[in-house]
């Protein structure tokens, strides 16, 4: 129409043609304005379309964020190790899903920022949405990481609590064994004692378990101070339970040891009764020997029995004494019987002293040098025997003092025998010392006589070869030596 109008009006001056030209110009102007209006409308619709697309993506992103916020807000700390492990796995899967959705959320944020940069008519609203989604996304990421860390801390705590629970159950189980007193009527006390020794060794080996839990608890408190109160309470409870278990175990060990020792003592008493019965049978024999040889044989057998008897008395007296202090409730007749054995032991020593007393108080000092030397050796042997029996005497004296302090029914008899034994012991020691002095003086005298005899024999021999004047000189010298020796000997006898 514009081209046709230009052809029609070209070169025309008529008013109608002039009006038509104006109308064509107005049409061209209106067309241009209409085209601008269309472009503006197109731009507005494009911006509105982009905004609506942004809102659609925003809703999807907000749905993701809402779901994340719900999960993060409603996740609780598990109370068992298995649940803690499962919660950590679930949280890790949840964070993997968050990573997968992060691209969509980031895309929405980037799109919104581009629309704002392009000057979208809804730029303010778009910017608000972008800021909200971006902040919520970052907050959820931080909350998810924090929750994962707290879940791992809770897992460490639950592992510690589970270890404490397992050790507590083990201690309670062992406590039942430690408190088992069924051995009271059992006969196999030794096997019970061996089993309890193995039980104590098991406790000692498992002490490392408690030490490990204590070390883990200390590390847990250092790394996570918020768990300090609970960890300290658990550790204190475990240590108390362990101390109670050890105390109960030691008490049972002592009871088993005492019961086993008492049982062994009872068996020893039975063996002693049997041995004494056999000894009584041997001592009541009417066989006293028919000749010197048979009598010597019987004497040797009796000496052997005496040595065995003394050793047996010492052995069973020590057992009885220890067992009496360990368990005063033992039968009185057993203890009194063994006290009688100790009294018999005193009698044996007393008989030994009386047998040697005759040798210690003997007035036989020998009639020549050889017999004096023999008597000196016998006296020295007796002194050595007394020294050898001194520990036995001290032992008997100490045991008797124990019995006297305990107010035993046999105290009076033991005190009387003890006084007699002490008196005899001191007497024989003093007598042997006196006899040693007398024999030493007799030895000097006999030595003088021996030397004098030798001098006389030598002079008699020389008389055959010497002249009469030389005889006088020799005899005078010899006589001077004899006088001097006799003077020394007499002075010693007078001083003694």
Image: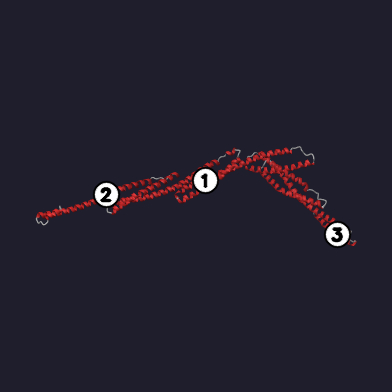
Tag 1, which secondary structure? helix
Tag 3, which secondary structure? helix
Q: Position of residue 39 (x, y in %)?
A: 22, 52
Is 346 positioned to the left or the right of 119 in the image?
right
First in sequence, mark 2 or 1: give its number. Answer: 2
Q: Which residue is mark 2?
A: 49
Q: For mark 1, does the 10 Å Cα neighbourhood hold few (<14), some (14 to 19), or many (20 or more) residues?
A: few
Question: Which residue is located at x 71 percent, y 48 percent?
Answer: 390
First in sequence, mark 2 or 3: give its number. Answer: 2
First in sequence, mark 1 or 3: give its number. Answer: 1
Q: Are marks 2 and 3 in contact (CB under 8 Å)?
A: no
Q: Which label is found at residue 240?
A: 1
Which quarter of the figure is the C terminus placed in?
bottom right
Is 178 positioned to the left or the right of 396 in the image?
left
Q: Position of residue 257 (x, y in %)?
A: 60, 42
The answer to which image quadrant residue 312 occupies is top right
Q: Which residue is mark 3?
A: 478
Q: Position of residue 249 (x, y in %)?
A: 56, 43
Closer to the camera, 318 or 434?
318
């Amino acid at each position: 129409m514009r081209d046709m109008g230009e052809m029609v009006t070209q070169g025309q001056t008529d008013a109608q043609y002039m009006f038509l030209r104006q109308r064509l110009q107005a049409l061209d102007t209106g067309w241009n304005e209409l085209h601008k209006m269309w472009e503006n409308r197109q731009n507005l619709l494009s911006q509105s379309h982009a905004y609506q697309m942004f809102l659609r993506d925003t809703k999807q992103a907000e749905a993701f964020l809402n779901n994340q916020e719900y999960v993060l807000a409603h996740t609780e700390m598990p109370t068992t190790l298995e649940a803690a492990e499962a919660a950590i796995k679930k949280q890790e899967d949840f964070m993997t899903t968050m990573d997968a959705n992060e691209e969509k959320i980031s895309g929405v944020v980037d799109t919104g920022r581009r629309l704002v940069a392009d000057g979208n008519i809804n730029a303010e609203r778009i910017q608000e949405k972008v800021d909200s989604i971006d902040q919520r996304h970052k907050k959820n990421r931080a909350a998810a990481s924090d929750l994962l860390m707290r879940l791992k801390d809770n897992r460490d705590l639950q592992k510690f609590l589970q270890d404490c629970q397992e050790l507590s159950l083990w201690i309670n189980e062992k406590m039942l064994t430690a408190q088992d007193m069924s051995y009271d009527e059992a006969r196999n006390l030794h096997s019970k004692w061996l089993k309890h020794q193995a039980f104590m060794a098991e406790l000692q080996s498992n002490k490392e378990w408690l030490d490990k839990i204590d070390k883990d608890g200390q590390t847990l408190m250092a790394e996570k101070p918020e768990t300090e109160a609970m960890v300290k309470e658990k550790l204190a409870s475990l240590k108390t339970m362990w101390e109670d278990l050890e105390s109960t175990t030691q008490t049972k060990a002592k009871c088993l040891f005492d019961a086993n020792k008492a049982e062994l003592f009872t068996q020893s008493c039975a063996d002693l009764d049997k041995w004494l019965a056999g000894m009584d049978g041997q001592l009541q024999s009417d066989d006293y020997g028919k000749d010197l040889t048979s009598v010597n044989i019987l004497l040797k057998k009796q000496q052997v029995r005496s040595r065995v008897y003394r050793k047996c008395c010492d052995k069973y007296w020590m057992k009885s004494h220890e067992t009496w202090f360990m368990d005063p409730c033992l039968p009185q007749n057993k203890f009194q019987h063994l006290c009688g054995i100790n009294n018999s032991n005193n009698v044996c020593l007393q008989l030994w002293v009386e047998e040697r007393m005759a040798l210690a108080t003997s007035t036989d000092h020998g009639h020549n040098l050889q017999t004096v030397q023999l008597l000196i050796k016998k006296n020295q042997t007796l002194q050595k025997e007394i020294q050898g029996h001194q520990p036995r005497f001290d032992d008997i004296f100490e045991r008797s003092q124990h019995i006297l302090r305990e107010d035993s029914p046999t105290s009076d008899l033991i005190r009387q025998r003890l006084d007699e034994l002490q008196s005899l012991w001191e007497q024989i020691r003093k007598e042997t010392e006196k006899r040693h002095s007398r024999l030493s003086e007799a030895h000097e005298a006999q030595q003088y006589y021996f030397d004098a005899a030798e001098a006389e024999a030598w002079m008699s021999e020389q008389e055959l070869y010497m002249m009469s004047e030389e005889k006088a000189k020799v005899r005078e010298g010899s006589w001077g030596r004899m006088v001097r020796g006799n003077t020394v000997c007499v002075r010693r006898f007078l001083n003694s």
